[in-house]
Amino acid sequence: MLFGAMSGDWYGDNPRYVFEWVLANRPGIEPLWITKSSVVARRLRSEGKPVALAFSLAGLVALARAEKAVFSDGLMDLAMDPVLVPNSLSLIALRHGRSVKRVRFARLGHKISEGETRAKRKEGSLTRVVISTSEFVSDIQEECLQIGREKHVVTGYPRNDVLMSVPRAHVCQWNLFLGEMTPAKTVLYAPTWRHGRNPTRFFPFDDVDISALHEFCERRQCLILLRPHRGDLVYPEVRAFFDELTGSPWIRLATHVEFHDVNSFLPFVDGLVCDYSALYHDFLLLDRPLIFVPYDYEEFAMTNGFLYDYFEWLPGSAVSTFADFLLELTRIGNGSDAHSEARRLLRDRIHTYQDASSTERVAELL
């Protein structure tokens, strides 16, 4: 059984947790992780985990012979090109997450290309089952995937098990990252990807003052972690802005380089800054404050659109000025929380299961 995730570039997301569970608990299944990254391959080999490079002879043979495969994002998780995926392969889609934004076939304005459409249609025809976190999520997910509503099964996401029951290895990894720092509060800033249309803007406020932000963080002992989408790091202006932001030790990068898997450190985060990302759906399970920065809401509503009413169900404050942003950070620091009921209402709509057993439920589908 093949496993892959994140376009073959990283080791993480839902397939990782099921892969490791199968290795530990299902001796009758022979799992193999497929990757395009030699770094990932070396790491997994050093840990004694079965892995093959997608472009290697071993990887190509495994792809040709496999009966089943587990993936998150798409066929590129498993192969160098979607055309290489045999039509006999039975797919189990664990998905990257379902956010409020319309994607794939549900987009309103910015349509996917003909080549991507062919690949996604092939993916859908080979998919036997796709997991979701609730019947509501299954409904909106089908709008995006268009593979047949009957294929959607509510299990919860395996990656969220570690939010409910934190592994000791994740605690050690977090402590190693912090070093000697002992922040009073930790806030993660992790907006969604704009699908390559333009770079995502961090702190997109007319009144933004980086020096004031540095001073605030130092005075309040507030650690801000920046996690851009890996697709945004190709922009020189984004990297230059991050260089300026991280001039303070209280603002640090937490990219896929520092943490392959965002859920591995999410339990140590006191507040989340986001916009339309699926991450805030995961974060609802922790019942902690959220700050929203929907600076391009009108544009996003036309290009992607939304799967449910964004503002009606918003489980936190939406800010449009730097002054308001600092005010919300102050409230997190003070323990002031005016949105707990809104969070719980959306949490219960998104997550049928709120436990640490999603991996086992998914394993039953294998």
Image (tube, rainbow, N blue to C red):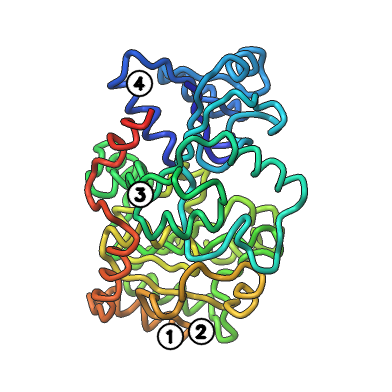
Instruction: Name the residue: 43% across, 46% down.
Output: 152
Instruction: Name the residue: 69% across, 68% down.
Output: 109
Choose top left, top right, bottom left or bottom right for residue 194.
bottom right
Disc 4 residue crowd, few under 14, some 14–19, many 20+, Cα 10 Å: some
* Circles 1 and 2: CB atoms closer than 8 Å: yes
Between disc 1 and disc 4, the foreground one is: 4
SS class, disc 1: helix
Which residue lies under the disc numbered 1? 324
Earlier along the polypeptide chain: callout 3 or callout 1?
Answer: 3
Nearer-the-camera pick, 231 or 3? 3
Instruction: Name the residue: 46% across, 82% down.
Output: 319
Choose top left, top right, bottom left or bottom right for residue 217.
bottom left
Which residue lies under the disc numbered 2? 320
Q: Label 3 is placed on what type of residue?
A: Phe
Which residue lies under the disc numbered 4? 23
Q: Which mark is residue 265?
A: 3
Distance from Cα at disc 1 to Cα at disc 4? 48 Å
Q: Position of residue 174 (x, y in %)?
A: 33, 46
